[in-house]
Image (cartoon, rainbow, N blue to C red):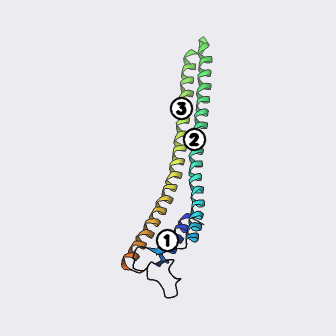
Amino acid sequence: MDPLDRIDELVTYVEAARSMPMSRSNCVIERSEMIALLDELRGELPADLRRSQALLEERDKIINAGQREADRIVSEAEAEHARLVSQNEITVSAEHEASRLVSEARQEAQRLRDEVDDYVDTTLANFEQFLTKALAAIERGRDKMHALREIGSFTPDDGDRPLPF
């Protein structure tokens, strides 16, 4: 079940709880049932958090792979540059070719970095939206609970269980 659905379930459970006599803010809740619902929510949230951590680790791997590839390309370009420079008759053309290769390597490395940054930004933005929605749902639930508490809608039914004291 989605963590937001689980939070809605908790809010509904608290809203349906019996009020304590002569109290607007206290209610009677089955401890074991509430603990079970909270344990289920706790079990679901780490999965989302682990998923975001995995995305960040994947981003780092992609950046590192791109950096290694860029370094390899630059190294090859520099090696090619050194080889061409050592030949006296083609020194000028070798310098131009080496500069072009280095420039292309740097452009390719920057392009890879930009793509990785865009991917990670999009993924983090999606996760941010998920968390924003979750926080909004929690806030709505709490606001509703507070509003109902203030107007006194938590009245016990005649068929409710006896008080625990």
Q: Could you tell which of marks 1 and 2 lies nearer the N-terminus? A: 1
Give the CA distance from mark 1 to mark 2.
38 Å
63 left or right, relative to 25: right
Q: Could you tell which of marks 3 and 2 lies nearer the N-terminus? A: 2
Residue 108, disc = none
The residue under the point 57% across, 23% down is 98
Q: Quadrant of the N terminus?
A: bottom right
Q: Extreme bottom residue here?
A: 158
Give the CA distance from mark 3 to mark 2.
19 Å
Amino acid tagged 2: Asp
Percent x, y for residue 107? 53, 34
* Quarter holding residue 48: bottom right
The residue under the point 55% across, 67% down is 6
Mark 1 is surrounded, within 10 Å at the Cα level, by few (under 14), some (14 to 19) or many (20 or more) other residues, namely: some
Residue 60, disc = 2
Residue 106, disc = 3
Percent x, y for residue 137? 47, 66
Towards the viewer: 32 or 109: 32
Q: Could you tell which of marks 1 and 3 lies nearer the N-terminus? A: 1
Residue beneath disc 1: 11
Q: Extreme left residue here?
A: 150
